[in-house]
Each structure stands twice: as structure tokens, then as C-alpha cells.
Image: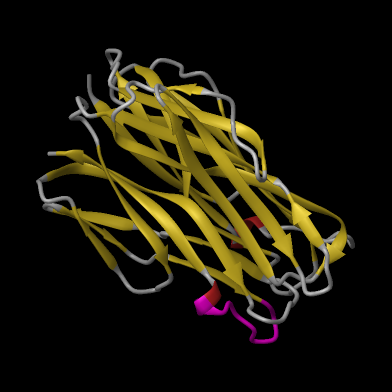
């Protein structure tokens, strides 16, 4: 009952394929890092959205369409070549595994939760949700002060839900309340094929190390659970926005993250206030 992890980096508005060595029986997809850019200039923001639409597994492959939108009300849109999205897929291969639930849900309105998801047990060793997309849109375009998107997890016995927060505000009272797509990995205490550790409220461009205390296999994934990024007390145009973990490596018992941060810039030298900006991540690894 092997569990496998695959990760891909792509420009947005493209289709990617996760190739696994055996037949895929269950899977979940999440975002690990994203950077959206208008290109050489900054602009107001009307829409900020990301979705990952997957097909039913075709034997050993899962195809995912990555759709991103960053635009204003004057026809300016996302620079696909200057933007990137990193996504990871966790899958159960070959034989069904009753000790783990892998699930995605879409269109979860901010302040609400997904439908009920059956869990493998009421006693979990892993109960972790993460982002697989979001959608925020305003009636017109505005400056941005703060952007936030979060996937949470609620458990009630043998069932669970993915909860949502998705907001974008300026300093003039304009407010976008949107929705998220989320993923869930829930494992009972009997599951031995996957490990997970949380890394919360991080804001650093330096490397981070997560030690699992046992030898790890060749693959890991660092899923983005929550991102809040803010210019601080003022609002500004946006040139680039994003965050998460841009890459990682495995060294014995440890997963080494390149960074763990949220960022926003304009074209006048304004950047995020690091005291008001952060990401929360969940690191998944496979035993060696």
C-alpha cells in the first residue's frame, strides 16, 4: 500500500502531469509556492485567483490544469512568463489504504467549511489541510493593503471539513471576501506510510530545517496552509505577490526548506511588512 509524492513547478495557465510508477487509487493536490506578476509595471488589483483542476487518474498519471488570474479594470493581466506556481501531489498507489484519506474540495466560501469528508478514524496521527487555490474578486480595481488565504481543518469524530478564509482589503474600506480550494490528508494512528509536521507563522528568506527523527525516503512535499501578506499601514499598487516554500531537499532525517515567506511589491520600492506577513506550512515526508 505505498504512498508516493510528486512535485512540479510550472508557469501558470498551463497543464502539468504527475507521473507515478504504479496505478493511482487516491490522490490530493496542493500548492507549495506561488508568485504572480504583472510584469514590468504595477497596477491596481481587481481579481486574484488560482485553481488547480485535476482529471480522474488514468492508470499511473494525474493531469492538472493550473489557472491563474491577476488583473485590474484596465486590461492589465498576469505575466505568465514572469509568474510561477509550484504544486505537489500525494497519492496512494497499487492497493487501497483504509488508514488514510486524501481529498480535495473547491469553492469553499470564506468563513465557511466544505462538505463532510469521511476520515479513516476518529483518532488521527495526521489531520492537515492546505490550499489548492482561491478566488478573490472586487467590483472594481483598488490598491491592496492586505491579502489573506487560509485552509483550516475541523474534525467531528469520523468526519472532517476544510475551513476557509480568503480576504483582500485596502485602506479605503474596499473589501473582497472570496473562496478557497483546499486539500486534506488525514491518517489514522495505524498509518505508517507518511509523516507530517507543521511549520507555522514563518517569514524568512533563509533556510528552515524540519527534523522527523527517522530516515526519510526520496520525496517530500511542503504544502501551503495559510498566507497573509501586507504592506503594513498603507496600501499600494501591486507588481508581484505570492509566497510559500520555493524548494526543499531531503538530508537523512531532515527536510531542508529553501525559505518560508510571503511577499508583495510595487514598482516604487514598497514591499511587505514582515511583522504583518507570514506563511504556515505542513511538511509531508515518506519513511525511508
Q: Residue at x 49, y 23 (%)?
A: 117
Quadrant for the N terminus, please: top left
The answer to whether residue 220 is magenta is no
The answer to whether one can see residue 33 in this image is: no
- Left or right: where 129 falls relative to 171: left
Above or below, comparing residue 90 to residue 273 in the picture = above
Spot occupied by residue 225 in the image (x, y as percentages of width and height): 47, 50
Residue at the (19%, 25%) spot, across then down? 190
Outermost residue, front direction?
157
* x and y percentages locating residue 214 in the rendered image: 10, 46
Task: Say above or below: 101 vs 220.
Answer: above
Q: Nearer the viewer, residue 117 or 156?
A: 156
Give the overall secondary structure of the magenta segment. loop
Does 272 appear in magenta? yes
Q: Quadrant of residue 259?
A: bottom left
Measuring from the top left, give residue 119's x and y in whole percent. 39, 23
Question: Which residues make up the magenta segment?
Answer: 266-275
Identify the image's colour scheme: rainbow, by chain, secondary structure or one colour.
secondary structure
What residue is rendered at 70% in x and 86% in y? 268
Count of marks, rendered view: 0
Residue at 62 percent across and 72 percent down: it is 230
Q: Quadrant of residue 195?
A: top left
Q: Is residue 227 above or below residue 113?
A: below
Percent of width and height locating residue 281 = 40, 54
Left/right of residue 62 with respect to residue 79 in the rendered view: left
Task: Say if residue 168 shows up in the picture.
Answer: yes
Q: Based on the displayed image, in which of its 4 quarters is residue 185 positioned?
A: top left
Farthest-out residue, top: 95
Quarter of the figure that contains the C terminus: top left
- Say left or right for 113 vs 136: left
Amino acid at each position: 500500500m505505498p504512498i508516493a509524492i510528486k512535485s512540479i513547478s510550472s508557469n501558470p495557465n498551463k497543464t502539468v502531469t504527475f507521473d507515478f510508477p504504479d496505478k493511482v487509487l487516491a490522490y490530493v493536490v496542493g500548492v507549495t509556492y506561488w508568485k504572480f506578476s504583472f510584469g514590468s509595471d504595477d497596477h491596481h488589483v481587481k481579481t486574484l485567483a488560482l485553481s488547480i483542476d485535476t482529471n480522474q487518474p488514468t492508470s499511473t498519471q494525474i493531469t492538472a490544469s493550473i489557472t491563474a488570474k491577476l488583473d485590474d479594470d484596465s486590461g492589465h493581466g498576469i505575466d505568465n512568463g514572469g509568474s510561477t506556481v509550484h504544486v505537489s501531489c500525494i497519492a496512494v498507489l497499487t492497493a487501497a489504504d483504509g488508514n488514510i484519506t486524501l481529498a480535495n474540495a473547491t469553492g469553499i466560501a470564506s468563513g465557511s467549511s466544505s462538505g463532510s469528508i469521511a476520515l479513516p478514524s476518529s483518532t488521527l496521527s495526521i489531520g492537515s489541510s492546505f490550499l489548492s487555490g482561491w478566488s478573490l474578486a472586487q467590483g472594481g480595481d483598488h490598491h491592496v493593503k492586505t491579502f489573506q488565504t487560509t485552509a483550516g481543518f475541523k474534525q467531528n469524530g469520523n468526519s472532517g471539513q476544510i475551513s476557509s478564509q480568503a480576504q483582500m482589503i485596502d485602506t479605503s474600506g474596499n473589501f473582497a471576501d472570496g473562496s478557497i480550494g483546499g486539500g486534506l490528508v488525514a491518517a489514522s494512528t495505524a498509518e505508517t506510510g507518511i509523516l507530517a509536521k507543521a511549520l507555522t507563522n514563518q517569514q524568512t528568506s533563509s533556510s528552515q530545517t524540519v527534523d522527523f527523527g527517522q530516515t526519510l525516503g526520496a520525496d517530500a512535499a511542503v504544502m501551503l496552509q495559510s498566507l497573509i501578506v501586507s504592506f503594513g499601514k498603507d496600501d499600494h499598487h501591486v507588481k508581484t505577490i505570492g509566497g510559500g516554500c520555493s524548494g526543499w531537499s531531503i538530508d537523512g532525517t531532515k527536510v531542508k526548506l529553501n525559505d518560508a515567506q510571503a511577499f508583495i511589491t510595487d514598482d516604487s520600492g514598497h514591499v511587505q511588512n514582515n511583522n504583518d506577513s507570514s506563511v504556515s506550512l505542513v511538511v509531508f515526508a515518506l519513511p525511508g
